[in-house]
Each structure stands twice: as C-alpha cells, then as structure tokens.
Amino acid sequence: MLISNHLKKYKQAMLLLPKATLLSKEDLLVDDFLMEHNGLLEMYYAPHNEYINPSAKVVIIGLTPGWRQMRIAIQEAKAGLEKGLSDEEVCRKAKEAAGFAGTMRIHLIDMLNALDLHRQLNISSCGESYHKLFWGRA
C-alpha cells in the first residue's frame, strides 16, 4: 500500500542514473533527490519509505534508514521503473530489497529476539522468520 506519491517527483531522476553500475554517494546525494535541508541536516528521497505492507505481522516505527538502504532502494526502484512496473510495485520491491539491509538487519533481529518477540509470536527466531514477519510469506 502506497502512503505517498513522492515517487512521481523522483522517477525521472532515477531513470537518468547510470546504468549497470553500483550507485555512489556522488550519484545519489544530489539536489535531484534532496527533499529537505535545514542547516547541516539534509534529507534525501528513498522509495522504500513510501510503501507499507498491510499483511505484516510486525511494524517497526522510528528507525531511520541509512546510505546503504537508500542505495539499494533506488537501484531496485530504477530496475522496476525500467521494467514498467506500477508505482506501488516499484516501491514494494524497493522496500523488500532495502528494508533493514546489511548489518542493520542482523542488529534488528538480535534486538527483537532479546525482547522475546519470537516467543510472543510462537516462532523459533525472528531471524528465521524475517520474511514471514515483515512480508507475510516464508
């Protein structure tokens, strides 16, 4: 489920990004993706923040994605746009690919297990059931 329509504003900039390359900070931390700034604080667009999975078993609020998640989300969204996917599908795929990617996911799973969330949900570990918890499928 899309919760905003920011993708429309940033689609063209994503489609103009270099092809077949790992995107860099020089590619993405640019005015084309700058949403807001206040003094030294800057906020850049990332498409995975536009999609909410209505069938998720767990909702995490208040974690800010970092550079790695931004890069993964934009690369995934660009690929989806090039394939002609709908805006909702583009943002869903971006969120699934980038959500808690890298070491952030490992730390999140450790924290959820430390809170005994897996016991509350009658599963063996939040790590073993990550996709089921957040995406409603194994």
Image (cartoon, helix red, strand yellow):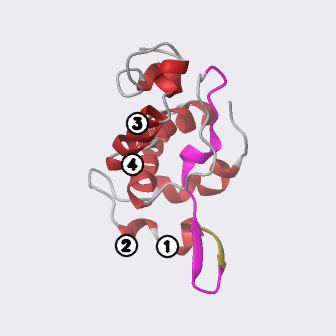
Q: Earlier in the sequence, mark 2 or mark 4?
A: 2
Residue shown at the point (47%, 35%) measured from the top left: 112
Q: Earlier in the sequence, mark 1 or mark 3?
A: 1
For badge 2, the amino acid type reads Glu
For badge 3, the amino acid type reads Ile
Segment colored magenta: 38-55
CA gap, disc 2 to disc 1?
7 Å
For badge 4, the amino acid type reads Met
Q: Are marks 2 and 3 in contact (CB under 8 Å)?
A: no
User: Where's the N terminus, which quadrant?
Assistant: top right
What residue is disc 1 on? 30
Q: Earlier in the sequence, mark 2 or mark 3?
A: 2
Q: Is residue 46 above or below residue 86?
A: below
CA gap, disc 4 to disc 3?
9 Å
Task: Indicate the secondary structure of the residue bearing disc 3.
Answer: helix
CA gap, disc 2 to disc 4?
23 Å
What residue is disc 4 on? 104
Q: Are marks 2 and 1 in contact (CB under 8 Å)?
A: yes
Give the percent coordinates (x, y) of residue 72. Answer: 39, 48
CA gap, disc 1 to disc 3?
32 Å
Q: Earlier in the sequence, mark 4 or mark 1?
A: 1
The reply to whether residue 79 is in sight is no
Q: Nearer the viewer, residue 9 or 37?
A: 37
Name the mark on residue 109. Answer: 3
